[in-house]
């Protein structure tokens, strides 16, 4: 029960923050706020990964955790096709990673867990380039091994 309450609190906080970003930063003539918000989620991908791994360790599902935290945000980017495509790519990469990790753990296949992590990092390379093309400046050390 406490875990579900925590998830609901986090979801409401993320949704509220999303609304603030979109209303405060974006307008009909500039979609920079929407792009910035999408890139902020990309930059924070390790947090989503950590929540998913925690849920998996507690007997849940990494994919379901990713869906829970990120899928409600997909509609937040409808006003700007570039940020929508970026966030969709990010979401798909995280979702694919979650599904792969769930399957690998169920099979006890440590090599597949490592491969899923490497595949996610490769996809984050691509997504990060899109953010940088939008003018996003990533914090130093936002990625593992940097």
Image: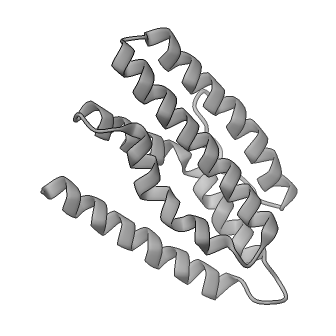
Q: Residue at x 74, y 46 (%)?
A: 127
113 above or below 20? above
Q: Residue at x 37, y 73 (%)?
A: 12
Q: Residue 19: where, in percent of width, then height?
A: 54, 81
Side of 84 relative to 51 (left or right)? right
Q: Residue at x 48, y 34 (%)?
A: 99
Residue 122 picture quarter = top right
120 above or below 17? above
The front one of 60 and 126 is 60
Q: Residue at x 68, y 39 (%)?
A: 124
107 above or below 21? above
Can the viewer see residue 86 in this picture? yes
User: Which quarter of the image is occupied by the N terminus?
Assistant: bottom left
Side of 109 relative to 118 (left or right)? left
User: Which quarter of the image is occupied by the C terminus?
Assistant: top right
Q: Residue 104: where, in percent of width, then height?
A: 43, 19
The front one of 145 and 31 is 31
Can the viewer see residue 146 in this picture? no
């Amino acid at each position: 029960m406490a875990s579900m309450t925590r998830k609901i609190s986090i979801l409401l906080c993320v949704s509220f923050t999303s609304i603030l970003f979109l209303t405060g930063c974006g307008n009909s003539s500039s979609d920079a706020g929407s792009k910035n918000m999408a890139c902020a989620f990309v930059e924070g991908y390790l947090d989503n990964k950590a929540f998913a791994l925690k849920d998996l360790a507690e007997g849940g599902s990494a994919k379901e955790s990713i869906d829970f935290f990120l899928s409600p945000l997909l509609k937040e980017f409808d006003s700007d096709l570039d940020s929508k495509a970026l966030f969709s790519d990010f979401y798909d990469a995280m979702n694919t990673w979650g599904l792969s990790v769930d399957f690998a753990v169920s099979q006890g296949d440590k090599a597949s867990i490592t491969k899923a992590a490497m595949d996610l990092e490769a996809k984050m390379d691509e997504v990060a380039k899109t953010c940088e093309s939008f003018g996003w400046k990533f914090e130093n050390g936002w990625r593992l091994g940097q």
